Image: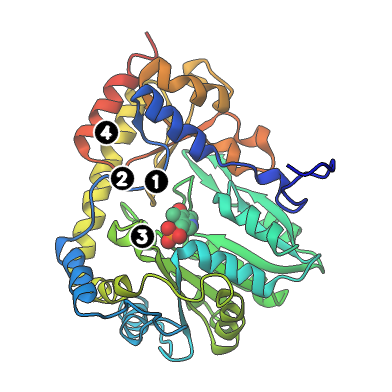
Amino acid sequence: MTSSARPLLNRRLAEFGTTVFAEMSALAVKTGAINLGQGFPDTDGPEEIREAAVRALRDGRGNQYPPGPGVPELRAAVTAHQERRYGLSYDPDTEVLVTAGATEAIAASLLALVEPGDEVIALEPYYDSYAACVAMAGGTRVPVTLRPHEGTFRLDLDELRDAVTDRTRLLLLNTPHNPTGTVLTRAELAAIAELAVERDLLVVTDEVYEHLVFDAAEHIPLASFPGMRERTVTISSAGKTFSFTGWKVGWITAPPALVTAVRSAKQYLTYVSAGPFQYAVAEALALPDSHFAGFRADMEARRDVLAAGLAEAGFGVYRPAGTYFVTTDIRPLGESDGFAFCRDLPERAGVVAIPNAVFYDHREAGAPFVRFAFCKRTAVLEEAVRRLKTLGG
Ligand SMILES: *Cc1c(COP(=O)(O)O)cnc(C)c1O
């Protein structure tokens, strides 16, 4: 310890002590509860992709520093994927950057593009790293709150418009949206695009759940709207799409000037990462459409098990149109404080969940909401539901 009264953690990060995930996961271990808190699958992704990683390791591909922008095979696979799925064409040499997961892509984008004092608008509730990365970049976060409306959380476009000031530099979007499961519609995205063009804003869009959209929902990249390609950094990752969250292979697609800027920050964060896994992810991205359709149907079925079970257990359920998560309202159970509820839940019912309030600046707006992950085996979800049904009685 230093003898001075000055705290060790600097002022920019002081409010971001430890994450609630660490606290809740520790509770899960201590109580033996089922952990539906953190969003990682409890089964690995495709065997052939695991084998592709083993092969790369054995063949000595990627065991030494890979190229700074990522291995050419992966950059080519990313551009082929954007073209095949969305009709978006990017140059693999100048318009792709491979990162240490989406997490580093977010950090590097904000560190590169935000000047101290710039305002960054993010949809609230937001993924927890956004606020910390805006703070590290010296920016000011400006949350625009998604509000519950007829069973989903919706963006108020007027509120978004009103949030833009002369100091706004960047919109930080996320669709499909964690934790609410909202998928922005074509009309909403078109309005956001118009606003970004009109106010000349940069956009960083986190689309890590691009392959996890359910029912009739459709994921449309914001970069595909008029005037957007040139101002948008699109972020995705292999973690959620292929159920290899430990590999930490992510990427951005953006025009050359934006890629160059983001790479300037990225090269001093990790420089490079995950060499052999990059080759495996290149193969994963080339899997046939039937693979992605099967994955999506499988996750949709799990969503149905958890959403129906939570409703039967007495929760208010916001049926997600995408992602790994169901957001619930605990007020029908006679509760109102998500933090207190989640701290007690492992003892009370043997299940761990996350209070959505941690994803809000306006904590009171998130107080009654609690998030459960359904990227788990069906038997695990069924057991969790069985336990949660004891809450009412
Ligand atoms: C999981 C997640 C990330 C992080 O992705 P990694 O590739 O594991 O770094 C980023 N954004 C959102 C919304 C996520 O849910």
- Disc 4: which residue: 381
278 in relation to 151, above or below: below
**Disc number at residue 39?**
1
- Label 4 is placed on what type of residue? Leu
Q: Earlier in the sequence, mark 1 or mark 3?
A: 1
Res 375 label: 2
Quarter occupied by residue 157: bottom right
Q: Position of residue 248 (x, y in %)?
A: 40, 63
Circle 3 residue? 239
- Amino acid on which the number 1 mark rests in the picture: Gly
Q: Earlier in the sequence, mark 2 or mark 3?
A: 3
Residue at x 71% of width, y 70% of height: 114
Q: CA distance from mark 4 to mark 3?
A: 21 Å
CA–CA distance in space, label 4 to label 1: 13 Å
Q: Quadrant of residue 301?
A: top left
Tell me the kind of residue under disc 3: Gly
Upstream in the sequence, badge 4 or badge 2?
2
Protein image colouring: rainbow
